[in-house]
Amino acid sequence: MTATCVILDIGGVLEITPDTGWVRRWEERLELPLGTVHERMHDVWQAGSLGNISEREVSEQVAARLGLDAPQVEAFMADLWSEYLGTPNEELIDYVRGLRGSCRLGILSNSFVGARERETTLYRFDELVEQIVYSHEIGIEKPDLRAFEAARDSLNVRPESCLFIDDAAANVEAARAAGMQAHLFEDNARTIARIAAHLDAGALAPRTVPLA
């Protein structure tokens, strides 16, 4: 296997995750002003993204801060996960699946506590790539450069050999600052073409020894 590497984001790249409007529907149902859910829950969402809170504690905070009973909490969290998980980007997933064995493959995702279990069950990303680095498991979010270093280190590759794919421009710029090549995901066609060009360039480059 060569040292050429492709690392992908999940939400907005491997998963199609449009805004479902679930938060506003809950605000209307609870007769709350627009923005109330975020105002009351933003620190909980942040804690969940960094792994500083458990799923049980998230549910407890939802109940306490929004005044929901147990069935409402279950429905609220189901709506959250429905938008979070979206639907699979089958075309890109199939393309990446075809790359296995020809390059190193990884995922770097800003995530939420419970994401690994759900995405593994639904999409089997653990079988698609070699390593998955979730923010809630390492306690660091993109665009912090340490997140990109963690992804690189998990695959034992050099940053310049990596192409990082993300739908957020700030994360693409951060990947470049971390020494990686990077591509802003806008559609499958351009992304697949960019990955193919990266792999072609890697095939022509002198072989390098992965980091020890």
Image (cartoon, helix red, strand yellow):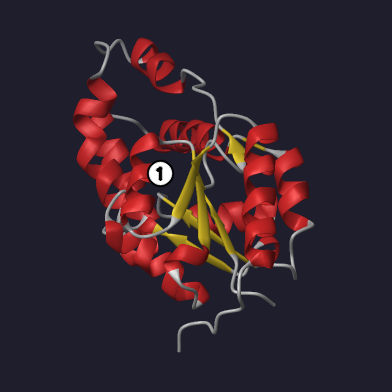
* Residue picked out by circle 1: 172
| Place of residue 172 in the rendered image (x, y in percent of width and height, measured from the top left) | 40, 44
The structure residue drawn at horizontal position 46% and vertical position 34%, both measured from the top left corner, is: 80
Please tell me in which quadrant of the rendered image residue 147 appears. bottom left
Q: Quadrant of residue 3?
A: bottom right
Q: At 31% across and 38% down in the image, what residue appears? A: 62
Question: Can residue 142 be seen from the camera position used here?
Answer: no
Q: Quadrant of residue 144?
A: bottom left
Residue 11 pos. (x, y %) = 52, 40
- Name the residue type under label 1: Val
Q: Is residue 18 visible?
A: yes
Q: Position of residue 206 (x, y in %)?
A: 60, 75
Q: How many marks?
A: 1
User: In this orientation, which residue lies closer to the viewer: 92 or 174?
Assistant: 174
For this rendering, which residue is in front, 158 or 60? 158
Dot 1: few (<14), some (14–19), or many (≥20) neighbours within 10 Å? many
Q: From the viewer's perspective, tell me whether residue 143 is left or right of residue 3.
A: left
Q: Secondary structure at mark 1?
A: helix
Residue 84 position, x and y percent, is 50, 37
Q: Is residue 114 above or below residue 88?
A: below
Q: Image quadrant for the N terminus? A: bottom right
Of residues 61 and 208, the one nearer the viewer is 208
Q: Quadrant of the C terminus?
A: bottom left
Lateral position of residue 12 relative to residue 25, left or right: right
Task: Please report the residue visible at 68 percent of the width from the left and 38 percent of the height from the top.
Answer: 89
